[in-house]
Amino acid sequence: MHGVEFLSGVLFPFVNFFMFLAVLLYFLRQPLQRFAQRQHENFLHSARTASAKAAELETLEAEVQSARTRLDIDLPALEVQTIADAEQEAALLAAEGGKVAAQISSEVQQVTAAFRRQLRAELKRIILQRVQQQLHVRLPQHTARSDARAVRALHAGAKR
């Protein structure tokens, strides 16, 4: 009985399971093949796309490296040119600054000369005004004395 129990207890369930699996695989074989084929095609498509992207990236990397090399070559010349341009611009600005400074100096001299002329004229006016005031104050006294002397001189000349 031990053999029957072995067959019905252990072997038959395994045989049943493998038969069920074989029938299941037989019916699912075509859908599984189609699924596997689609997965394979998707993988191949993804691989081709990745390969194309990799080639494109390599091309872009080569272009970037070429541009970097050109920049490394052109950068020192560009730096020298920029410094030369900046020095030239600084010289032009300095020359223009000198012209502006000379113009300002000239204008300052003209303004000070005009101010001096105005001050001299004002001083002459003030001096003339003070002289006229002094003359008005002293002239009547001189006129009166002169008239008195003239009258005395006339009288003295007439008496002689």
Image (cartoon, helix red, strand yellow):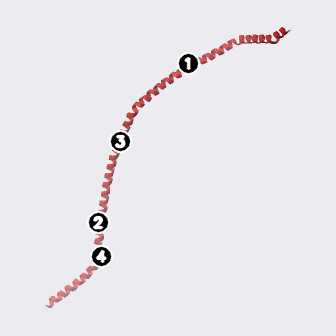
Chain-order first, disc 3 or disc 1: 1
Query: Disc 3 to disc 1, how far (Cα)?
Result: 56 Å
Q: Quadrant of the C terminus?
A: bottom left
Q: In the image, what residue occupies the spot 30% across and 63% down?
A: 116
Q: Which residue is mark 2?
A: 120
- Residue 67 is situated, as x and y percent measured from the top left of the image, at 44, 28
Few, some or many C-alpha atoms within 10 Å of disc 3 (few <14, some 14-19, many ≥20)? few
Chain-order first, disc 2 or disc 1: 1
- In front: label 4 or label 2: 2
Residue 149 lies left or right of residue 137; in this view the side is left
Q: In the image, what residue occupies the spot 28% across and 78% down?
A: 136
- In front: label 4 or label 1: 1
- Residue 44 is situated, as x and y percent measured from the top left of the image, at 58, 17
Helix, strand, or loop for circle 4? Answer: helix
Query: Disc 4 to disc 2, how far (Cα)?
Result: 20 Å
Few, some or many C-alpha atoms within 10 Å of disc 2 (few <14, some 14-19, many ≥20)? few
Q: Which residue is mark 3?
A: 87
Few, some or many C-alpha atoms within 10 Å of disc 1 (few <14, some 14-19, many ≥20)? few
Query: Disc 3 to disc 2, how far (Cα)?
Result: 48 Å
Q: Residue furthest front?
A: 2
Q: In the image, what residue occupies the spot 33% across and 44% down?
A: 91
Helix, strand, or loop for circle 1? Answer: helix
Q: Which mark is residue 48?
A: 1
Q: Quadrant of the N terminus?
A: top right
- In front: label 2 or label 1: 1
Q: Which residue is mark 4?
A: 133
